[in-house]
Amino acid sequence: MWKLPTVVSVFSSLLFVVNLQHAHAADRVELLLRLLQKKGIITAEEAEALNQEVTEAAETEGPAALPVQSEPEKSRTTQEKEPKKLAEAPESEVRTELGNEGLWVRTLDGRFAVGIGGFLIADWRYFGIDTPQHDFFDIRRARLSVEGWVHRDFHFEVEGEFEGSDEPKLRDGYVEWTHFPWAQFRAGQYKQPFSIEHLTPLKYNPFAERSFVRALAPGRDVGVMLNGTLRDEALVYGLSFANGSGLDPGLDSSSDKDVVGRAVFRPLSWSKPPFLQALRLGGSYSYGRIDPLDLRDFEITTAGTTPILRLASGGKFGLITEADERWRMGAEVSWPLGPLLLQAEYADVGFDGLRGTVGDPFNAEIQAWYASAVVFLTGERPHIERGVLQGVRPKSDFSLSRGTWGAFSVGVRYDAFSADRELFRVVDPVAFTAGAYGLAGALNWYLNPSVRLAFNFVHTEFEDPVAVGYTFIGQAFEDSEDVLISRFQLDF
């Protein structure tokens, strides 16, 4: 039998050693027991029993209950040499995601998020063999963007364009307060609220190129905007106050500004049948006083990128010396019906007080419209959010190993434009036309949410012969254009 004082003393000592330095407890206990056995204080059987009891006691207390020896305090010199560290948050507070939406870093509380993305569009345009137009490969878009949220309510986006021979250009650059979904405030450079086709990114457009309506929309501009949604997007609106000069030119050429507004309604959102709820009707309007410099970028082109009407084109014709007012108005309808999307728009732009190098001031208008139908052969449903068509998510991504092929859609579109003949007082009547209409067919293969292959055939008829290139005998003119567009697109 063990003597009680001996047992109590040894057992207490062992627990003290274990608690003193838990990381090395096993080694110290074994060493102490051997020493006690060697001095004859305890027998071998007692040493084994005590070792078992101490081990069980340590396990009962658990590692979390044992004190851990702190590191010695570092000297002031050492602290000054080391870089200052921010307070480190637990790993679970930040989440990194890499997927179809790009690379995102978010805090789990939703207060901060930043994402990097972009997209690349590469085209091949084939015009045939009986035309002076040259077939060519083209980088249609090459963009990188950074966007995110700061303190949950402040959204920002910066997007640059790297396509073309010019220096990289800022496309979007704005900050937006998003606390209330029905009233969000934006400042910077952004697309003006006009036309669903214009606001839908080209990468999401079911056709390789937009219709003639796009040329009449105001495009991107620098200003401030109030926008929002009401009652589950029964109403989507945007009201912008901007320079009216297009992409940031540095200093605006005038103190006059443009007012641009758009509203989209779901007039049957209260009805029970879902297909009636999806119907959207919208209207857009803009007005502003202008000067000739505000017209420098106005151009209408075909799907083959051939210019068919251009203002302020310079030379003997096309020199605008005065301009007073510009107004735009548009109407739109979009109706997703299961895998079918029906969409149509009309736009009208008017210029008042135009004057060329000779003659009196005059007014002129340009009208354009289109109607389109797109159907997904694999059953995907087109989705419209905040009045803008969104990207396609195939029901199953393309995979040879699984035998899945992604999503397929086909579409057809008819579009047209007509301009007042008065415009030929400031437009070259030899090189351009006062009207055209086009018929487009599209086949899209969505391999996954990020990759699309597209094949479009577009036939365009010109009201007047248009200069399309040069031959060995001089400038060549055509009264129509046929182009086959093959596209590879990557969005991340």
Image (spheres, helix red, strand yellow):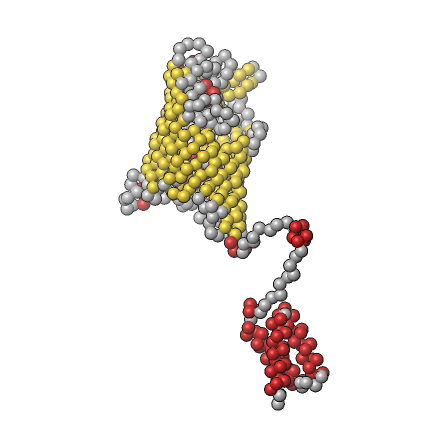
Can you give x and y, in whole percent of width and height, for residue 365 in the image? 38, 20
Q: Residue at x 29, y 39 (%)?
A: 267
Q: Quarter of the image holding residue 387?
A: top left
Query: Residue placed farthest to the right in the image?
Result: 38
Relative side of 411 to 87, left or right = left
What residue is at 58 percent from the left and 29 percent from the top? 167
The image shows residue 100 at horizontal and vertical percentages of 50, 45
Front residue (pair 68, 359): 68
Residue 414 is drawn in which quadrant? top left
Front position in the image: 233 or 27: 27
Residue at 44% across, 26% down: 244
Residue ranking furthest to the top: 358
Q: Residue furthest left?
A: 271
Q: Position of residue 125 (x, y in %)?
A: 52, 30
- From the top left corner, tell me how far across and down residue 460 is, in percent: 44, 25
Is 94 drawn above or below residue 290 in the view shown? below
User: Relative to residue 225, is residue 40 depicted above or below?
Assistant: below
Q: Nearer the viewer, residue 380 or 177?
A: 177
Closer to us: 119 or 474: 119
Q: Residue at x 44, y 44 (%)?
A: 153
